[in-house]
Amino acid sequence: MQVKKIILLMLLLLAGCSRESFEPVQTSEFAAVLTIKEPGMTFISPNGAVLAEWEFDEQYTGGLLFNKKLLMYRTDGTRAGLYSVETGKKLNEWTVPKGITGAVFINETNEIALSVKEDGAVHFFDQEGTEIKKTRTGRYPMTMLEHEEKLYIINYQDTVLSELDIHTYRVSREFAIPTSSTGLAVNKQKNELWVGGHGYGAKAGETIHVYSLKTGSLTATADAPVMPVDFASKSGFMYAVSHGSNKLYAFDPERKRVAETDAPANPFAIAVLGKTVLSAGYDSGTLSFYEEKTLIKRKTIDIGKGPFMIFVEEGE
Amino acid sequence: MTFGKKLWMTLFVFILIAVGAAFGLAYMLYEKLYVESVKSELAAAAENLSYDYEGGELSADFIKQVGWFSEKSPFDAFAVHNPRELAACIPYEADYETLIGPEERSRLLENKMIEETGYSERFDRQIISVIYPLLDDKQLKGILYLYIPLERIDELASSLIMFWAAGAALLMGLLLYGGMKWTNYVIKPLENMKRAAVRLSNGDYTARVPAESKDEFGQLAHTFNEMAESIQREAEQRKTFLATVSHELRTPLSYIKGYSEAMVNGIGRAEQQLGIIHREAARMERLVNDLLELIRLDSNKMNIEKTILPLADLVYRTVDTFRLKHERFSLDIDEEIIVKGDEGRLVQVMTNIIDNAVRYSQKNKPIYITLKQENNEVKWIVRDIGAGMPEEEIPKVTNQFYRINKARTREDGGSGLGLSIVKQIVERHEGELDIQSEADVGTTVMVILPALQDEGVET
């Protein structure tokens, strides 16, 4: 009896010590959907088949997909887990600042930038998890985007969008934006920066603000009610998701709204995988697939409770 | 702390608990009945309003309609369709206090109504609220929010509470006053008893407690009085005993002193005087011996050494010692009778009894002595046709120094201790002493002893 107990205890200890291991994903083209209410990650093939389902012990609030690795963090934590998509194994655990609100991989320098609300700064890490530099940008930096050796950062609770030089880590420019802006995209053809709006206080945002990257000034607006919070772009087309009204919008390269459709209930994320537009509903726990440009819905699958982010890997 | 105070405190605590419990019960009823009924009214109204929602985005008409309802009904009601208010953006960490939280949102998404009672930061007051979901194909398009400020209910309750508090205070005052009176009433017999006990311990044996009631206190008082009486009796007996002993000793002493003085002075006949002195000294000796005997018997210090005795032999021997003093004895003796007893003591019993019979009988009147066995009892009976005594005197004759004819004391020559000693000895032999008498007719004294059962001796 006693021996059995000891063996059981040792097994438990061993299980506790061993690193988490999940089903590996070895295809080069997939989308990964992070769910918050049921902490996990679901990997989807372009045709909508579930490749793997990971269930985390920890409630990660965000993540970052780079070089077939997933860096998972939680806003209220100081540890971030690094997982290999190809092996399904936890590779490492990074010590990170508390209050991470966003993450981006900078292809130019192979560095990871983490926006941190606590100190209003962007922290740069190398691929080993060592912090290189941090730059203060404004109150509550959140959405980030890399474009032509620059890093654009929306300060959510501020009225400035910061442009950082990724080599010098210095703020090179600041754009005046409405407060509570979120969602960022670049229209390469027109050299424009698209900024979404969540809206401040009880007033919901209904407009996308478009800034000229050349002059830094507001050049146009586009209606996308209510609360356009995330963008995805492909082949010159821009797609926006409005989580306040559960809508998806498609804009042609001329910034003209060409399609509009219902999104799953309470969507936060939009992404393009191949020729498919994906959007997940936080309330409905579903992921819907749409044809590009026309936004005709193809299918909807259950994805788990509280999908919040979609990561896309399209290979080389 | 006195018992009275303890009792009063206990009562006070009980009253507090009772009043508290009553308050708690009242509050629970208020909570259960009133709040619940308001909640169900709110819920019914919310459900009714929700029937007008036809899906899709909330129309301006619908919102206006809800506003109209709010004006006309006792409840405040409004429809909300701003997703921010509906906690749709919670993962973004809203910089804004939403109307509902994420848990509430997920319950609403399951088409469940939410009822709440408590403080609302939004309205800065206590409210009872009902949140009703407006769903369109699993999308939370809006909510109906109905509430009623609790203040109104509290106002109602507060006026009630005033009455209630006044009533409670009055009731408590009355109960406490009554309780105090009652406590005093209850502990009064105890106080009386305490005072009486103090008097008793200070030597006042007349102290008594009024014992009117029939309850435990009454019974206790009654027992106390009995105890006091027996203490008083005991004390008086001791006093009488001492007085009697001194008196009894003084009489022969005064004889001895008087006659010896006469002899010293050469008055009267010396021989006769010496005879009297001798007689009185012998009487004194007997008195002292009897006293010692009695004291030893009383304090259980005397050893009774029981042996198997043929009782008839004892009777014959004892009677023989009286032949000189009295002429006529009529004997009816069962010679087979054997008892277990102390020979010397039983001889003493017989001697004392026959001595009494002889002393109070005329010489020519017969004294009947019977020894027989009835069942398990041996009966030894001495009957005389002598002076006898009144019936009421019988129970007292075994008392120490008790004499029927007090005036004849010295003439009779007894110490007044004889029957006392007899009674003690008989009782030590597990026997009984029975005396029957009638004045001028005679006296019958019966000693009953347990018969010897074993060894097949008796028939």
Image (cartoon, coloured by chain):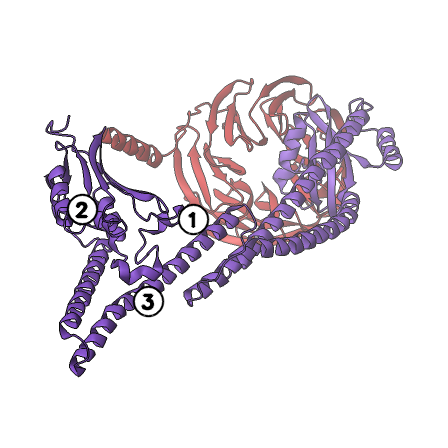
Name the mark on residue B243.
Answer: 3
Residue B357 left/right relative to B108: left
Name the mark on residue A143.
Answer: none
Q: Which residue is mark 2?
A: B327
Q: Secondary structure at mark 3?
A: helix
Q: In the displayed image of the protein, which residue is found farthest to the bottom? A: B265
- Which chain is represented by red in the image? A
- Report the Cα–Cα distance between label 2 and label 1: 143 Å
Residue sitting at x 19%, y 80%: B267
User: Is the residue A75 above or below the residue B267 in the image?
Assistant: above
Is residue B87 shown to the viewer in this render? Answer: yes
Q: Chain of mark 1?
A: A
Is residue A243 shown to the viewer in this render? Answer: no
Q: Which residue is mark 1?
A: A130
**Dot 3 amino acid type:** Ala
**Dot 2 amino acid type:** Glu
Q: Position of residue B327 (x, y in %)?
A: 18, 46
Residue A62 left/right relative to B51: left
